[in-house]
Amino acid sequence: MAAPTEKKVLHSGRHASAMKRARQNTARKRYNTEQRKLLRASVKAVRGAVARGDRSAASTALQSAIPAVARIGGKGIIPKTRASRLVSRLTKAVQGLPR
């Protein structure tokens, strides 16, 4: 069986502007997907620390997650209201841990 290779992207369009737009969309989709992966990883780190009951690790993970969530929300990768709600819920979860 052949090794999996990167999927070949077919650019649609006849005009140079249409082909450029297709290339931009592909690059933007790749970037946005990577940013969402980083977001999920940072949120998972906070939730994991909260589940373990480790307040110091949770607050450290939260401090690194808040800028990431804000940046992704500010760029429109996720809605700003969802980013705000996520930060609020994570903060509330960390604050609820015993000292």
Image (tube, rainbow, N blue to C red):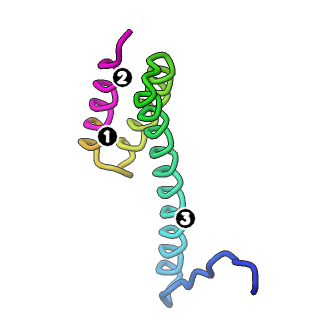
Q: Which residues are magenta?
A: 85-99
Residue 2 in the image: state x and y as whole percent. 75, 85
Foreground label between 2 and 1 = 2
Name which residue type carries label 3.
Answer: Ala
Disc 1 or 3, which lies upstream in sequence?
A: 3
What crowding class fits label 1: few (fewer than 14 Cα within 10 Å), some (14-19), or many (20 or more)? many
What crowding class fits label 3: few (fewer than 14 Cα within 10 Å), some (14-19), or many (20 or more)? few
Instruction: Specify the principal SS of the magenta part.
Output: helix
Foreground label between 3 and 2 = 2
Q: Name the disc covering residue 83, or none.
A: 1
Residue 85 to residue 30: above or below: above
- Residue pointed to by mark 2: 94
Q: Are marks 3 and 2 in contact (CB under 8 Å)?
A: no
Residue at left 48%, top 73%? Answer: 21
Residue at left 34%, top 30%? Answer: 90
Residue 65 located within the stretch drawn in magenta: no
Foreground label between 1 and 3 = 1
Give the residue furthest to the right. 2
Q: How far apart in space, not on screen, are marks 1 and 3 (Cα)?
A: 23 Å
Residue 38 in the image: state x and y as whole percent. 52, 45
Name which residue type carries label 2.
Answer: Val
Name which residue type carries label 1.
Answer: Ala
Q: How far apart in space, not on screen, are marks 2 and 1 (Cα)?
A: 17 Å
Residue at left 53%, top 54%? Answer: 34
Q: Secondary structure at mark 2?
A: helix
- Indicate the quadrant containing the C terminus: top left, top right, bottom left or bottom right: top left
Residue 29 in the image: state x and y as whole percent. 48, 64
In the image, 62 versus 22, the foreground residue is: 62
